[in-house]
Amino acid sequence: MKLIILDGYSINPGDLSWAPIEAIATFHSYDRSRQDEIVSRIGDSDGFFVSNCEISRKTMEACPNLKFIGVTATGYNHVDIEAAKELGIAVCHVPAYSTEAVAQHTFALILELTNLAGRYNAAIQAGRWYKSNDFTFNAGSLTLLDGKSLGIIGYGNIGRRVARIGEAFGMKINIYSQEREAAIKSDFITLHCPLTPETEGFINKAFISQMRDGAFLINTARGALINEQDLADALKSGKLAAAALDVISAEPPAAPHPLIGLSNCILTPHIAWMPRETRQKVINICADNLNSYLSGGNLNRIV
């Protein structure tokens, strides 16, 4: 079987091996592919793996040997599933591979908001400790998690894992789907819900106005859940103490972005899912999906 991956860089920038897939099929990886390169790169391949490239009906119809599409992620909204079904093309994905990684990153962001490790390190590197009159110095007030409330919006696998970690820190857990008002009034609110027409932009001026003054907002789900200008305004006014986001509505962002440059907004570039071990898991599951398909199975098949 002849296969390619259209955009392998985010999964494997060079620190992992594609060996589990190479053991099954003749395989070539492209770091990334422009939309106008996709059809020619697929060529006469029997299948391909894809992370983020848009795969349309037109693309599928232009590749007559195509039998298999492996999505190297959980979400597959960038693949025309109805077209694949009508054309008899199998589509598989990688469900629930990043639960532990995203929960860990959620608390990495929370701890950066509360313990300011990066800020203190930057102050030390700038020479402030050399000049201190005491054994320590104050570059910002720290916050204790024990006794604080954590509102969780989205209580699937990741939300539940975050809840368990929060409980270990001594936090009171408020689940939005079960106790909406308590969740909105929490000291911290963390987003783990899917992006749907109903949830798009729902963290807006009206929602923020209901939040506790001085609360913290964390988002490791989808950037478009938040109206970013409304969040920026709340951070500038002091309505919210701070925010920490791993995702924004358009990635990479276009300059100027309302949240970039704010001292009380921490941003990371959509890396919550990216520990080396997690990316290796993706490769291994992709190989398992392919093996299952070739043996007539349905492991992680969407169609």
Image (tube, helix red, strand yellow):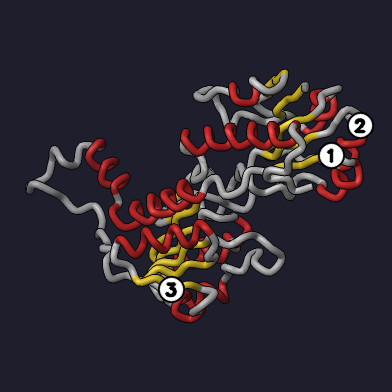
Label 3: state its secondary structure.
Answer: strand
Residue positioned 33% across, 54% down in the render:
111
As shown in the figure, which amino acid type bears the numbered disc 1? Ile
Mark 3–mark 2 CB contact (< 8 Å) = no
Count up the numbered dots: 3
Residue 124 visible in rendering = yes
* Disc nearest the viewer among 1 and 2: 1
Classify 10 Å Cα crowding around label 2: few (below 14), some (14-19), many (20 and above).
some
Mark found first going from the N terminus, 1 or 2:
2
Which residue type does callout 3 highlight?
Asn
In the picture of the structure, the residue carrying the numbered disc 2 is 62
The residue carrying mark 1 is 89
Residue 126 position by quadrant: top left
- Above or below: residue 48 compared with residue 136: above
The tag on residue 174 is: 3
First along the sequence among labels 3 and 2:
2
Q: Nearer the viewer, residue 200 or 146?
A: 146
